[in-house]
Amino acid sequence: MNKLVNMLVVIVVMTTVSSPVFAALPDPGMQIEKGRTALVVTDPQNDFLSPKGVTWGVVGKNVEANNTVENIDTLFKAAKAHDIPVFISPHYYYPHDHGWKFEGALEKLMHNIGMFNRKDALNLEGFEGSGADWLERYKPYINDGRTTVTSPHKVYGPETNDLVLQLRKRGIDKVILAGMSANLCTESHMRELLEQGFEVAVVSDATAAAQVEEGDGYAAALVNFRYMANTVWTTRQAVKTMQAEQ
């Protein structure tokens, strides 16, 4: 039954994407303007992006198919080269978060598998190399003293952290959005940033999602990116646009 449901979901997604109505959607685009544009990356952490991470079994194939790890690296490199500020919205769970009295499906799963666990906000014991830590190759970009790391979001979107405040305080109103996971934190960040009046360009191959019997998270996210974002770029398009606007 689950396989049948999954097949129906894929057919609906493919039909929607290829339908005349969907194809007729405008692409408003987004211009990169120095001083007003930032790269925002959600959850560039081991538990999502490392083969040793606790979610690799469900996201790994899509991460590899999209070349997600390398594409996020390319975005970091381009943003630093063109003086575009970088903001990281991480996901951490502390012991007190495991005392929640109710949870959604993925929240419960994340807590059960110890995803993004840390001792507490001020204790880095065991953090280095853990699932909550940055992917090693990203550390030179994130730990360079110029990248803004916000407080953690706790469910999916930035409503629970200070990302919007940090962007506003820097005069940012345009966001290039990438990171994990496509139909969860990345999509939730897109939705909230749009509601807050930001322009958002989503980089479709610098993210990935779980592909399980219940459905293809990445395919679902692509549909919503196309419906809602100001534009959807590939990594190559994003880098080209960064270069052109300098």
Image (cartoon, helix red, strand yellow):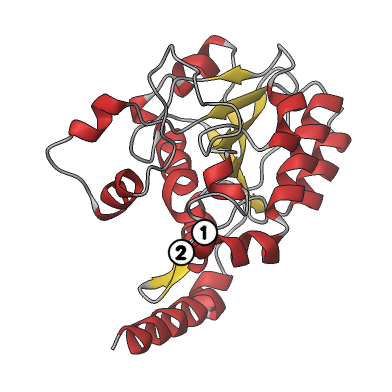
- Choose top left, top right, bottom left or bottom right for residue 63: bottom right
Sooner in the amino-acid sequence: mark 1 or mark 2:
1
- Read off the residue under disc 1: 209
Determine whether, in the image, residue 244 is placed left or right of residue 153: right
Could you say where residue 60 lies in the image, as x and y percent from the top left? 59, 61
- Choose top left, top right, bottom left or bottom right for residue 59: bottom right
Could you say where residue 44 lies in the image, as x and y percent from the top left? 60, 38
User: Residue at the spot x=58%, y=42% of the render?
Assistant: 46
Q: Residues within 10 Å of mark 2 (few under 14, many from 20)?
A: some
Determine contact: label 1, label 2, CB under 8 Å: yes
Determine whether, in the image, residue 159 is placed left or right of residue 235: left
- Hey, what amino acid is under mark 2? Gly
User: Do we see residue 94 in this rendering?
Assistant: yes
Rendered image: mark on residue 217: 2
**Which one is nearer the viewer's eye here, 242 or 70?**
70
User: Residue at the spot x=36%, y=49% of the render?
Assistant: 113
User: What is the number of callouts on the image?
Assistant: 2
For the C terminus, the image quarter is top right
